[in-house]
Image (cartoon, grey):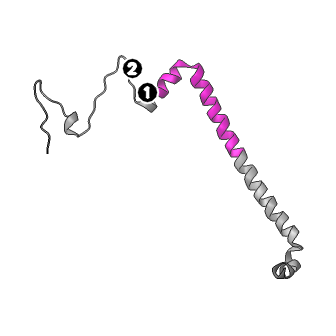
Amino acid sequence: MFLSGIANHWVGSPGVWQALQLRLLLDQRNATRTKLEKEMTAVEDEVSRLEKNAFVQERQIRRVLGYTGADEIVFDFASSPTNAPRLAGQTIKSKR
């Protein structure tokens, strides 16, 4: 009550101040909703493409899961001793 009486000269009644704050909050929420709707539309379009196009499915499987095609060779250049090239019959000694 005390604060509303002082602020009454500059912003009017407390209801006007609350209405302004609520209008700002509504605008922010609407902007967020619009952004999320655009993102949802983009995701729905991608789902539609994945469901209908075998090439897109294969590309995503390779990209996300790391699968390779039947005619591809993969070279692993990791520095781990278990991935290092070995000669036939050569075993890896564990460090224990």
Could you say where residue 37 lies in the image, as x and y percent from the top left? 70, 40
Q: Is residue 61 left or right of residue 95?
A: right
- Describe the element under mark 2 as helix, strand or loop: loop
Q: Is residue 41 left or right of residue 23?
A: left
| Residue type, label 1 | Arg
Q: Where's the C terminus, which quadrant?
A: top left
Is the stretch drawn in magenta largely helix, strand or loop? Answer: helix
Residue at horizontal 60 percent and vertical 24 percent from the top: 49
For marks 2 and 1 on the same chain, the one whose residue lies earlier in the sequence: 1
Identify the image quadrant of residue 51: top right
Q: Residues under labels 2 and 1: Cα distance?
A: 8 Å
> CB atoms at circles 2 and 1 under 8 Å apart?
yes
Q: Which residue is mark 1?
A: 62
Could you say where residue 17 lies in the image, as x and y percent from the top left? 83, 69
Q: Which residues are magenta?
A: 34-62
Q: Where's the N terminus, which quadrant?
A: bottom right
Q: Is residue 42 left or right of residue 25?
A: left
Could you say where residue 78 lies in the image, as x and y percent from the top left? 26, 38
